[in-house]
Image (cartoon, grey):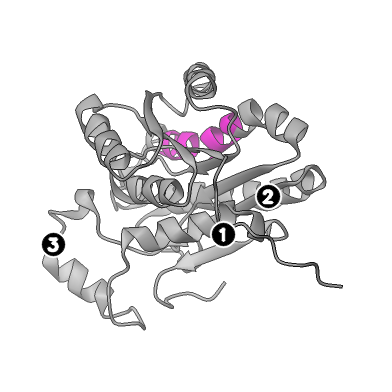
């Protein structure tokens, strides 16, 4: 039996607090902006450039978004604990975490990798989601509400080469998310994934035009994706309306993959 619709706006995040890791630029910045425009208080996370984070913070505040910026190495348990404590003090208990931070992603043959490179990928895509969840879950469980959103990638399904370290770590992140969705569902906490394709942002500015043209030719929709299209997918998954959606992957890539 259907219940009467709520008077609240669909997909409203009013009253929620969101942390987006690696959100001073790129897809993270777009996601933080979309969450904020939907009513969430937003914690911008950055690792290196305070200047860039301050610029992003100013943009969000100019758009009427309640936000603050927090430096942290999100592969460090101590760094995450310090950041979340500061977020809670500034904005309130965290309801939503979007795991977006990433290291450099060079394509190179397996013979040119060393284990330190593999470890860096695992630290960002397996260790960081685990550390963030471990820090946030007590509060989410107590409130019986939480949204964990992992930014994965189409490369895991496609097995892109020569990219084995990145693809393997994204596979680990996907497996972790699928297991955690079952573990946390009884607590009202969802765990989902967004798998973007190649969506050009600041760090792609100097990528070869031939590579861009070749990729664009493979997108069934015939156009590039926009960073905010990843952000709006995150808004849906973070919302009350997605409360019965968990363990799923939304591919934001114009139809290049079917999950």
**232 in the magenta segment:** no
Classify 10 Å Cα crowding around label 1: few (below 14), some (14-19), many (20 and above): few
CA separation in Å, label 3 and label 1: 43 Å
Secondary structure category for the residue under label 1: loop
Look at mark 1 in the image and give the residue it sits on: 9
Find numbered disc 2 in the image and state the secondary structure of the residue it sits on: strand
- Residue 130 in the magenta stretch? The answer is yes
For the residues carrying marks 2 and 3, which lies nearer the camera in this image? Answer: 2
Classed neighbour count for the residue bearing mark 2: other residues with Cα under 10 Å, few (<14), some (14–19), many (≥20): many
Numbered mark located on residue 190 in the image = 2
Q: Residues within 10 Å of mark 3 (few under 14, many from 20)?
A: few
Kindly check if marks 2 and 3 are in contact, taking CB atoms under 8 A apart as contact: no
Mark 2 and mark 3: span between their CA atoms?
39 Å
Task: Please tell me which residue lies in front, 79 or 173.
Answer: 79
Q: Is residue 107 above or below residue 75?
A: below
Secondary structure mostly seen in magenta is: helix
Where residue 254 appears, as percent x and y from the top left, is 39, 75
Does residue 112 appear to the left or right of 121 in the view shown?
Answer: left
Q: Residue at x 20, y 28 (%)?
A: 51
Q: Quadrant of the C terminus?
A: bottom right
* Residue 64 visible somewhere in the drawing: yes
In the image, residue 144 sits, relative to residue 259, either above or below, namely above
- Quadrant of the snapshot with the N terminus: bottom right
Give the residue drawn at x 60%, y 45%.
148
Judge depth for marks 3 and 1 and give the one in front. 1
Q: Which residue is mark 3?
A: 208
Residue 94 at x, y percent in the picture: 58, 33
The magenta-colored residue range is 118-132
**Helix, strand or loop at mark 3:** loop
> If you read the primary sequence from the N terminus, does the residue marked by circle 1 or circle 2 appear first?
1
């Amino acid at each position: 039996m259907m219940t009467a619709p709520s008077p609240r706006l669909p997909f409203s995040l009013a009253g929620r607090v969101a942390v987006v890791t690696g959100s001073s630029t790129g897809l993270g910045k777009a996601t933080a902006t979309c969450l904020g425009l939907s009513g969430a208080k937003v914690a911008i996370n950055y690792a290196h450039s305070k200047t860039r984070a301050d610029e992003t913070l100013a943009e969000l505040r100019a758009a009427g978004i309640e936000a603050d910026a927090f430096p942290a190495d999100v592969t460090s348990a101590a760094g995450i604990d310090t950041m979340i404590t500061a977020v809670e003090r500034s904005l309130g208990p965290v309801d939503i975490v979007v795991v977006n931070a990433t290291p450099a992603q060079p394509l190179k043959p397996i013979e040119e990798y060393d284990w330190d490179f593999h470890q860096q990928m695992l630290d960002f895509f397996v260790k960081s989601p685990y550390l963030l969840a471990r820090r946030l879950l007590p509060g989410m469980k107590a409130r019986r509400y939480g949204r964990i959103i992992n930014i994965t990638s189409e490369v895991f399904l496609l097995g892109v080469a020569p990219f084995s370290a990145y693809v393997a770590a994204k596979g680990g992140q996907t497996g972790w998310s699928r297991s955690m969705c079952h573990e946390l569902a009884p607590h009202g906490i969802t765990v989902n994934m967004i798998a973007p394709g190649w969506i050009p942002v600041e760090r792609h500015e100097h990528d070869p035009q031939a590579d861009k043209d070749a990729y664009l030719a493979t997108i069934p929709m015939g156009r590039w994706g926009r960073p905010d299209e990843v952000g709006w997918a995150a808004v849906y998954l973070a919302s009350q309306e997605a409360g019965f959606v968990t363990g799923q992957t939304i591919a934001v890539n114009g139809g290049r993959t079917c999950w």
